[in-house]
């Protein structure tokens, strides 16, 4: 009999060759961001009045938020629908979502002309209830705080019983430990409120991101513009969230030399297939109802991007996940989930960049070198932050170990945490 999976912090060093490479990339992105903040958008980007949104909105914000949907989808499955077998996936998904939203906000600051006014949406005198972007800003702001609150029990668990301040501060060890225990106990009683709030807020702003382009029906390709664009964004976020949890879990297992949780991931991947199928049917039905299929075979760049999005990002992984062999294979499951992640990323790029064509624009938009460096730097920074967090905090489950039975109970031979609150 195997021991239950308890979250633990990894016993690994941080200074590895991969970490050093990622650090160099992140520092390069930081330098590019500094250039943008000092010299402005005009000097650092290829954005114009005709193309006010570019790579940072399409990838850093829209794609980042969609791929961070695993936080609320996994929480909903494990805690709202009480599928407790998937709790082992919740903490890593929560961490990925928290970091994803954090870095999406950083990317948004780079895109804002007056980035120092990013606090305006939270000030009541500046509210604008008729703005879709206001609703997105409020939901993302509140949900980001919800994610940090959901992560607090993990922080408390890490430091309870381990507070050891030196010198004159030693007298504070007891009070701080008592405060951490009180915080964990209080959060355990009210956490269901934040879980429910997180699911509701996520559904609101995931769909509202699609509403941003409803005001531009004559500036977008009919392959992507539709009155139900908010629904499409929400359905694709569901599929992306489940796929990202699988992708992150398998990639973390491979990176850290751990055994993947294949029995759980194989069952969890069925959610990917279900929501991907629903999204694909809705997408195709919408095109047929609007009679917009013709553009898919026009032979231009837009049709090529559309076929790549649907073929590689929807149809192929959906077909792969029908086979039990694929769902039970780490390589097969990683390939299928990677294709879903790629498809959602490509969809957001298509909607915000490829489909958007102003009628009087002079030339075409292509991201500048600073835009690319900032985006790549943000991705590298996110991966570094994930590595630090799983090293310091009990996020990933302990690997299976032998157990011995004593007094009619199962005693694990490997160390585990006494309590494991997950959310």
Image: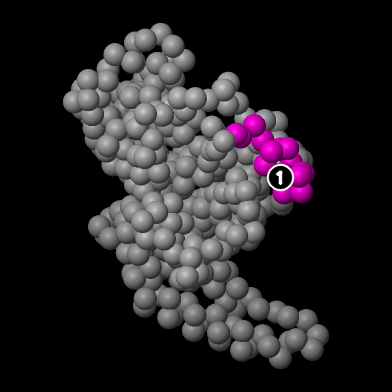
- The magenta segment is 31-48
Q: Secondary structure at mark 1?
A: loop
Image spot of residue 245 (x, y percent): 43, 45
Closest to the observer: 15 or 38? Answer: 38
Q: Which residue is mark 1?
A: 40
The residue under the point 22% across, 20% down is: 291
Q: Residue at x 51, y 44 (%)?
A: 61
Q: Is 82 placed left or right of 172 in the picture?
A: left
Majority SS type along the magenta span:
helix
Q: Is residue 24 left or right of residue 337?
A: right
Image position of 355 with respect to 116: above or below = above
Name the outermost residue toward the left. Answer: 289
Left or right: 268 in relation to 60: left
232 vs 54, nearest the viewer: 54
| Residue occupying the point 51% across, 37% down | 58
Q: Where's the N terminus, which quadrant?
A: bottom left
Mark 1 closeness class: few <14, some 14–19, many ≥20 residues within 10 Å: some
């Amino acid at each position: 009999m195997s021991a239950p999976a308890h979250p633990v912090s990894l016993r690994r060093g941080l200074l590895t060759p991969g970490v050093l490479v990622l650090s160099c990339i992140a520092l390069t992105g930081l330098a590019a961001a500094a250039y943008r903040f000092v010299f402005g958008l005009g000097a650092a980007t290829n954005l114009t009045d005709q193309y006010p949104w570019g790579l940072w909105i399409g990838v850093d914000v829209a794609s980042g938020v969609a791929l961070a949907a695993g936080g609320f989808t996994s929480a909903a499955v494990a805690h709202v629908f009480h599928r407790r077998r998937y709790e082992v996936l919740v903490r890593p998904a929560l961490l990925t979502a928290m970091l994803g939203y954090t870095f999406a906000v950083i990317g948004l600051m780079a895109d804002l002309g007056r980035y120092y006014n990013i606090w305006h949406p939270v000030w009541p005198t500046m509210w604008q209830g008729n703005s879709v972007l206001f609703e997105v800003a409020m939901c993302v702001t509140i949900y980001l705080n919800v994610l940090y609150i959901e992560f607090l029990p993990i922080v408390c668990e890490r430091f309870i019983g381990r507070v050891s301040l030196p010198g004159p501060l030693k007298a504070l060890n007891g009070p701080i430990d008592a405060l951490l225990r009180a915080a964990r106990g209080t959060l355990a009683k009210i956490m269901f409120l934040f879980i429910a709030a997180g699911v509701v807020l996520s559904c609101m702003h995931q769909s509202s991101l699609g509403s941003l382009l409803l005001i531009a029906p004559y500036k977008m390709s009919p392959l992507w513009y539709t009155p139900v664009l908010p629904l499409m964004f929400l359905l694709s976020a569901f599929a992306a969230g489940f796929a990202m949890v699988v992708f992150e879990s398998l990639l973390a297992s491979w990176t850290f030399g751990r055994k993947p949780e294949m029995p759980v991931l194989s069952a969890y991947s069925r959610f990917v297939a279900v929501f991907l199928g629903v999204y694909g049917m809705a997408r195709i039905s919408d095109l047929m109802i609007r009679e917009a299929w013709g553009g898919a075979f026009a032979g231009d760049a837009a049709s090529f991007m559309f076929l790549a999005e649907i073929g590689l990002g929807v149809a192929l992984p959906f077909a792969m996940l029908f086979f039990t062999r694929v769902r039970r294979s780490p390589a097969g499951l990683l390939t299928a989930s990677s294709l879903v992640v790629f498809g959602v990323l490509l969809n957001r790029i298509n909607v915000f960049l490829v489909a958007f064509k102003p009628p009087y624009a002079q030339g075409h938009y292509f991201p500048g070198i600073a835009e690319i460096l900032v985006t790549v730097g943000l991705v590298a920074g996110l991966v570094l932050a994930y590595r630090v967090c799983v090293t310091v905090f009990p996020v990933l489950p302990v690997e299976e170990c032998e157990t011995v039975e004593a007094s009619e109970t199962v005693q694990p031979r490997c160390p585990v945490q006494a309590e494991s609150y997950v959310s």
